[in-house]
Amino acid sequence: MFKILGVDHIGVAVGSLNEASNFWTTALGLECTGDEVVAEQKVKTSFNPTGNGSEIELLEATAPDSPIAKYIEKNGGRGGIQHIALRVDNIEAAIADLQAKGVRMIDTKPRYGAGGASIAFVHPKSAYGVLVELCQHK
């Protein structure tokens, strides 16, 4: 068994971190905690804490075959909400439990995510079209 601890973050696909950050930091007043490249996922990311333990994650593609580049292309060149991340207490237990319940997973074992989190994605076909990320922080 596993427990969902809350919404960790909402991932937003953007064409440019610099341009998108202006809205989130200047217009909304959120602080950006810095950029990070996650080479394995072919993205550059930045997090903007919302003050309640959740964050807005901005995601920019670093390669044409990045999932973010594909998302933006699929959406007519526009970005948008790419995924919702749920914080779990035990990611290995979450993956095993979901698979036992017949949930289709993209990741059958945890992998490295931004900020050093362990992550795994639930396939959108099992979540009614929503890409759900499970994450566990060290």
Image (cartoon, rainbow, N blue to C red):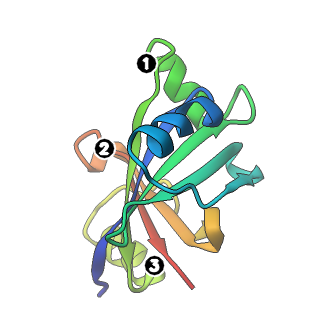
Crowding near the residue tagged with mark 1, few <14, some 14–19, many ≥20 C-alpha atoms within 10 Å: few
In the rendered image, which residue does mark 2 sit on?
A: 130
Is label 1 or label 2 in front? 1
Estimate the x, y position of residue 54 in percent, counting from the top left.
37, 65
**Does residue 127 sit above or below 23 in this rendering?**
below
In the drawing, does residue 28 fall left or right of residue 127? right
Estimate the x, y position of residue 14 in percent, counting from the top left.
54, 31
Q: Amino acid at mark 2?
A: Val
Specify whether residue 109 is in view.
no
Q: Amino acid at mark 1?
A: Asn
Estimate the x, y position of residue 137 in percent, counting from the top left.
52, 79
**Does residue 134 sit above or below 90 in this rendering?**
above
In the rendered image, which residue does mark 1 sit on?
A: 75
In the rendered image, which residue does mark 3 sit on?
A: 91
Do residues under tags 1 and 2 come within 8 Å of each other at their CB atoms? no
In the drawing, does residue 11 fall left or right of residue 34? left
Front-most of residues 92 and 16:
16
